[in-house]
Image (cartoon, helix red, strand yellow):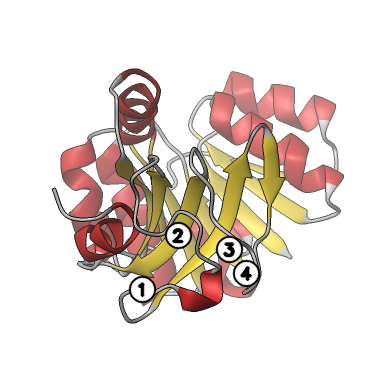
Amino acid sequence: MFIIIAGGGKIGLHLIRALLAQNHEVALIERDRRVCEAVYREYEEVAVIAGDGTNPELLVRAGIEKADVMVAVAGRDQDNYMICKMAKDLFGVKRTLARVNDPRNEDLFRLAGVDLVISVTSMVSRAIEYEIIPHEAMTIFTWHERMSVVEVDLPADAPVVGLALRKLDLPPNSLLAALWRKGEALIPDGNTVLQEGDEVFAITLRGHEEELRTSLVGAD
């Protein structure tokens, strides 16, 4: 794949290293000429353009008309928004990914059609909540604002303990995707019997998280 990265900070540099290791073609647009020179010296196969990624002429120079993915990880949300917006609307790039610094801007990016919005602040907040705050069920990931991955800890009195998956009465458009049991990861099938202490990872449509939780651990 041909991937353009706008922003050569730590995230951008890690991406370049990882993508090249997977044999992808990479171009970088970065304001800081010192960063550009360092990338060029270390990765001669990367096309490096010094300048503002919100400039459509620089996007063309980077080869955006043939790009498979546009990744915007610049330091400012407004820049990442404009870069992804132009990539989609002006150049027809199929996949766009953006870094968002202020979680309040996440919905704006999604409304603009950005395929993957990465908010480091939100991720850290969820990690803290997950690790520190006691919980029975928690939404740990959402995808395109349409699907949720929910993690549920099964207590001894959960109505599903002792039942095989095929006998569960889950909400529509929901499934159990994985289990964490006594330090081991399991991919369940219809014959897998749920046990006390299982950490269940389930997928459901947005809006059905609470219904899914209730079906697994019972009503409060």
As measured in the structure, the alpha-carbon distance from the residue carrying label 2 to the one carrying label 1 is 10 Å
**For residue 177, side relative to residue 100 (left or right):** right
- What is the crowding at mark 4: few (fewer than 14 residues within 10 Å), some, or many (at least 20)? some
Q: Nearer the viewer, mark 3 or mark 1?
A: 1
Nearer the N terminus, badge 2 or badge 1? Answer: 1
Residue 127: image x %, image y %?
A: 39, 28
> The residue tagged with tag 4: helix, strand or loop?
loop
Choose the circle earlier in sequence order: 1 or 4.
Answer: 4
Q: Nearer the viewer, residue 206 or 135?
A: 135
Specify the amino acid type for callout 4. Answer: Asp
Which tag, 3 or 2, sits closer to the chain's start?
3
Residue at numbered disc 1: 170
- Which mark, by number, is residue 202? 2
Q: Nearer the viewer, mark 2 or mark 4?
A: 2
Q: Look at 37% across and 80% down and name the residue there.
A: 173
The residue tagged with tag 1: helix, strand or loop? loop
Marks 3 and 1, how far apart at CA: 36 Å
Expressed as whole percent of the image width and height from the top left, the position of residue 206 reads 26, 67
Answer whether residue 16 is visible to the viewer in this image: yes
Q: Which mark is residue 69?
A: 3
Residue at 22 percent across and 38 percent down: it is: 103
Q: Residue at x 79, y 56 (%)?
A: 24
Report how far apart the C-alphas of labels 4 and 3 lie in the structure: 4 Å
Q: Residues within 10 Å of mark 2 (few under 14, many from 20)?
A: many
- As displayed, is residue 120 above or below residue 65? above
> Mark 4 = which residue?
68
The reply to whether discs 4 and 3 touch (Cβ–Cβ < 8 Å) is yes
Q: What is the x, y in percent for residue 180?
A: 60, 42
Judging depth in this view, the residue of 121 and 47 nearest the camera is 121
CB-based contact (under 8 Å), mark 3 and mark 2: no
